[in-house]
Amino acid sequence: MRPLRAIAVSCWLLVAQGFAGTENSSSNQEKSTFHSDVHLVLVDVQVINKKTHRNAGSLKQDDLRVYEDGVQQQISAFSHDKLPLSIILLIDLTDSVRPVLQSLSQGALLALQHLRPQDQVAVFVYSASAYLVQGFTTDRSLAASAIEKAGHQKSREAAFFNEGIYQAAKYLSAGKNPESRRVILWFTDNVPNVPSDEIKERNGKSLFGKELHTEKQALEQLFRTGTVVCTLLKRSQMSDEEDARIRSEDGADRIDRMMHPPGDVYKYANATGGLVVESDGKKLPAKLAELIDDLRLRYTLGYSPSVARPQGSFCTIKVELAPAVKKLQKELIVKARQGYYR
């Protein structure tokens, strides 16, 4: 429905011991005298079969290529299912979404067992603003209880997607493990309110005394924190009605939507290398478990940028299969975030 992660190598050495396909521990110790001004960019990558949408879990470092601003980079670190996860479960309080949360809460504890002991979970809900229900915890029962609690919450406020995503990504940056892979798992029907000036004044600024964050600001926060957005999409009658309404919008409404983008699950997923998985209420716990398994099986690539750029610059990232692999396995597609800020 990952940043910077440009980090000093002195910090990176703490992570490198867990990377597959790198030097053994003795050679790691021999190479522990890196200069602290060298930075490593970590990129979370998923390679899936475009027909089955399942992970391809047998690739090696040489099977992938990474480019920054169009220039190929040398991959200096490579792992598969090694780094821990920091996950925020972001829950839409829209009327059409809330009923399926009961089904989710009943199976959440079992689904969360697919996480590893070091993985941490937090729970947010949002409507016009975002609220923390449960801070980061490795206690699965606490997380499951927070989902159940969220299922009983109600809101008549507007649903502002950008604000929810921005606040969740900001909270992820405060996680206890800075080297974890950061993920927002989003439960929604993809029916946002357009944050026009009129609606913001009525439902946002006038309520909270502050401006709502825009889609552009939310995307920037995602890129700065290196966060992947994945969505469990529960379509509803309201979703279908909203799609039809958007298709029939007149010029003024269309311009308003263009000037104030409300946020979209597919746009956030494409920008960050995430997935959107549709599900009905009964299958939601099983889909959550599958999504967690898929997150665990992502690859992490590390490279030191070959071109110096000013601090604060946005650098584009592209990850693709090596030509030989692309030729032999045409059914595979690569998903990765579109860039990061230096």
Image (cartoon, helix red, strand yellow):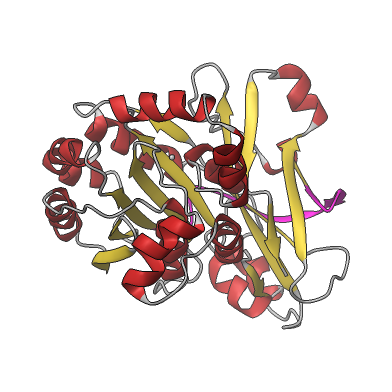
Is residue 282 at least partly visible in the picture? yes
Q: Position of residue 284 (x, y in %)?
A: 25, 32
Does residue 324 show up magenta in the picture? no
Foreground residue among 11 and 286: 286
Residue 317 horizontal/vertical position (percent): 74, 51
Query: Looking at this view, is 36 or 314 the one in front?
Result: 314
Question: Residue 215: which quarter of the image?
Answer: bottom right
Would residue 79 appear left or right of 84 to someone viewing this image? right
Q: Is residue 151 left or right of residue 210?
A: left
Q: From where the camera sits, is residue 236 visible? A: no
Residue 56's place in the image compared with 292, above or below, is above
Q: Quadrant of the N terminus?
A: top left
Q: Position of residue 287 (x, y in %)?
A: 31, 32
- Residue drawn at point x = 71 percent, y = 73 percent: 31
171 left or right, relative to 148: right
323 lies above or below 132: above
Q: Main secondary structure of the magenta part?
A: strand
Give the residues drawn in magenta, as a range: 67-86
Residue 78 part of the magenta segment: yes
State the residue at coordinates (43%, 51%): 161
Q: How many numbered markers are drawn?
A: 0
Quadrant the C terminus occupies = bottom right
Q: Is residue 124 left or right of residue 210?
A: left
Counting from the top left corner in percent of width and height, residue 319 is at 72, 42
Along the line of sight, the residue nearer the viewer: 46 or 129: 129
The image quadrant that residue 3 belongs to is: bottom right
Q: Is residue 196 above or below residue 15?
A: above
